[in-house]
Image: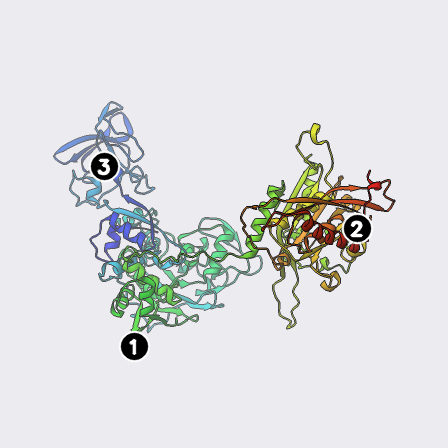
Amino acid sequence: MKFTLTWLREFVDFDLSAVELAERLTMLGLEVDAVVDLHRELAGIKVGRIIEVTPHPDADKLTICRVAVGARSRQVVCGAPNVRAGLAVAVALPGARLPSGLEVGEATIRGALSQGMLCSEMELRISDSHAGVMELPGELEDGLELAEALALRDTMIEVDLTPNRPDCASVLGIAREVAGITGNRLHPPAGADLTAAGDRAAGFTVAVESPSDCPRYAAVRLGKVRIAPSPWWLKKRLLAIGQRSINNVVDVTNLVMMETGQPLHAFDFAKLGGKAIVVRRPAVHETLVTLDGTERPLAPDMLLICDAAKPVALAGVMGGANSEVSDHTTEILLESACFDPVTIRKTARRLNMATEASYRFERGVDADGVLRAMQRAVALMQQVAGAEQIGAVVDVYEGRQERPAIPLRINRTRELLGMDLSGEAIASCLSAIELQVTREGDDLLRVRPPGFRIDLEREIDLVEEVARLQGYNDIPTRVPCVPMSFPEQDEGRRMRRQAAEVLIALGFNEAINYSFTAAENFDRLGLGADHPARRTVCLRNPLSEEQGIMRTMLLPGLLETVRTNVNRQNVDLRIFEIGKVFNPSVASDHLERQPGENQRLCGVLSGLRYPGAPLLHYGTPPADLLDVKGAVTALLDELRLTGFDWLTATEEVAPHRPGFVRPGSCAVLVPAGDSSATGGATLGILGQVEPGILRAFGIKQEVLFFELDLDGLLRCPAMFRRFAALPKFPAVKWDMAVVVPEAVEAGRMVETIYRSNEPLVERAEIFDIYRGKPVEEGYKSVAIAITYRSNQQTLDDQSVEKVHGRLLETIMSRFQGRLREAAEQP
């Protein structure tokens, strides 16, 4: 939105400089993009008066003009056809620089001395006219600076408006804001009295087929119109804001639009068939040639202004060439209307037509201001074009809507702004910008926003208006009271962060995959039709067929990540992902509900156990199931979680093992206690992926994986950190070697020692497992070193022997073992 200080001062009095005004407008929320002193490039251009014109002796199309510039006269050679004695002209004297950058000097043209240059409007960048020299008003005094004589010196301000402030897309709207901060009275422009011809027939009809598309349409017929160039004051005003002059009628519509924010359009009445206006949607395959000469295809959701037979304008965007005002026009139909913003916005975007009219209509035009803008335009057309009103104004206002009053609490306004404002002060602020304020009681104001303030809908909007007008800089600043307490952290977020840190320390890299996946991944995994993972949440509008459902497992995404890396020769992989899986909710009341979400952690290992390590020392052993279990165990230890058990025996794992896990290479994490009592619930699973499944995913090397239910683990009890003094007494280490059946898990033997609750046991660790003669087949010898320590005294053999004996008896009875004899030593 562009305007000038002179124009603005016609509507409101203020003594702010351009810079001060720009600062105040910015603080009001109207960001100022530019403050430009106009026509600085005309410095050095003078007003001259032609005293004498004589033909050039050596050129038929040139003349020699004697031009008076102040006390001196100059000889200027000119080729313009409109030079004549007594004409006031714009003269560029030697040394002056034109807006184009050309420096004027004395020159000899066909043997005649030329001491300057007579300028056209185009050379001065005042308009596009270059048919002759610029003709100035005869009463101007020669010798004056051109910019001063024509009152061109002014300051243009450009404001960048937000979409919620269409009321400020006009000089009057800006003036209203200035009136609000200065307390001065607003002076709206005067308009014609359109009721004078109200007792006569309008001479045309208006039909609005869809009031929702066009809430209000007003039109008036004007006769005895003389189409001519606009007077200088009108040209100058449009020139200042970067608009070119067309003719007096069109220039008036543009001027009023910039003044009031209400776009107008003038039709040549003689070109309207049937003397009728119909506002309707387009017919099938209908087109319109707009004023720019382009034939526009029309979509069914656009809006047209038509006569009785054909479209004559694209509503709210641009008029049609078939009803354009021309030099032969003597009667016009002046339109002032309000259109649905969404309809105009879609039309302008679809046709790529951004006009000043569409800019305002698509943001919202005040329906109550339609007639005021028309009155102003008619008054100006009477002044500059001799127009006379013919018949009554036709005003179709079927979309009238009364805006409700908004309650505004005075104390609430004070609290939010931190300012001690009285009810009278608040009411005065809002009344200054033409809001209707009524006092109700000691703490309540009822505020009715005018039609041009479409952004005011709630109490907080009114509080913001008070803050703007009072000044944001005047709102008192206070240091906030910050409680010195540590905020409670979300345990789930803490666990996710800590789990990621642990796995990264173990050499894993984190991956982030889409939460969308393809249903065919379940077929690749070999899951049965009744598998719970196939109960998915389907997307109504997926990005692609490969992303049509929400994932119920993390493993397929990581397998695709493995394939991508292996195909790029990155074969030694340790990758994990923490993310949500989604399951459809069951709504018993037949209402749609959000899917259930479960936080899970999945990791994969593939390739060497020690990637990147020197082969001379480590060799090339591949990662195996123990590496996976070691990583999971280290993770659970760092999370300090308890209350779970590992299932590794084939008969225990069988109910939980998915078909894509290789038999004999699977372990399941379940809540502590009898696995049958958990109802099949698991906290995690690890194992080796079946080779056939890997081939389905395009992977040609072994892949091991683990997947943990983080939400389930969050419900497991966690050990608190405990600190103890360094031990004062020495430790004693005793060994036991027990022969047990091959199926016995050595780790369970260590767990049994820890869970014996013997106070002297400090540490238990396996240091040897032996198979072979003399130990019989089907058995193995497990050697465990147990460290004993007392915090009270130095241990003697008798004290240790009692505890060690009890532990040995427990191990042998629980695991069907026997003490390994000396004869069985290897």
Quick check: 87 above or below 189?
A: above
| Residue 630: quadrant of the picture | top right
Q: Of 35 and 446, which appears nearest the observer? A: 446
**What residue type is disc 2 on?**
Val
Marks 1 and 2 in Cβ contact (< 8 Å): no
Note whether residue 122 is visible.
yes
Is disc 2 surrounded by few (<14), some (14 to 19) or many (20+) residues within 10 Å? some
Residue that carries the numbered disc 2 in the rendered image: 744
Residue drawn at (75%, 51%), measured in percent from left and top?
808
Quick check: 502 above or below 256?
A: above
For the residues marked 1 and 2, what is the alpha-carbon distance in whole angstroms? 85 Å
**What residue type is disc 3 on?**
Ala
From the top left corner, tell me how far across and down residue 603 is, in percent.
Answer: 67, 47
Is disc 3 surrounded by few (<14), some (14 to 19) or many (20+) residues within 10 Å? some
For the residues marked 3 and 1, what is the alpha-carbon distance in whole angstroms? 62 Å
**What residue type is disc 1 on?**
Gly
Local SS, label 2: loop
Local SS, label 3: loop
Is disc 1 surrounded by few (<14), some (14 to 19) or many (20+) residues within 10 Å? few
Q: Of 403 and 496, which appears nearest the observer? A: 496
Whichever of callouts 3 and 1 sits on the residue coming sooner in the sequence is 3
In the picture as drawn, the residue positioned furthest to the bottom comes out as: 441
Residue 428 located left or right of residue 143:
right
Which quadrant of the figure contains the C terminus? top right
Residue that carries the numbered disc 1 in the rendered image: 441
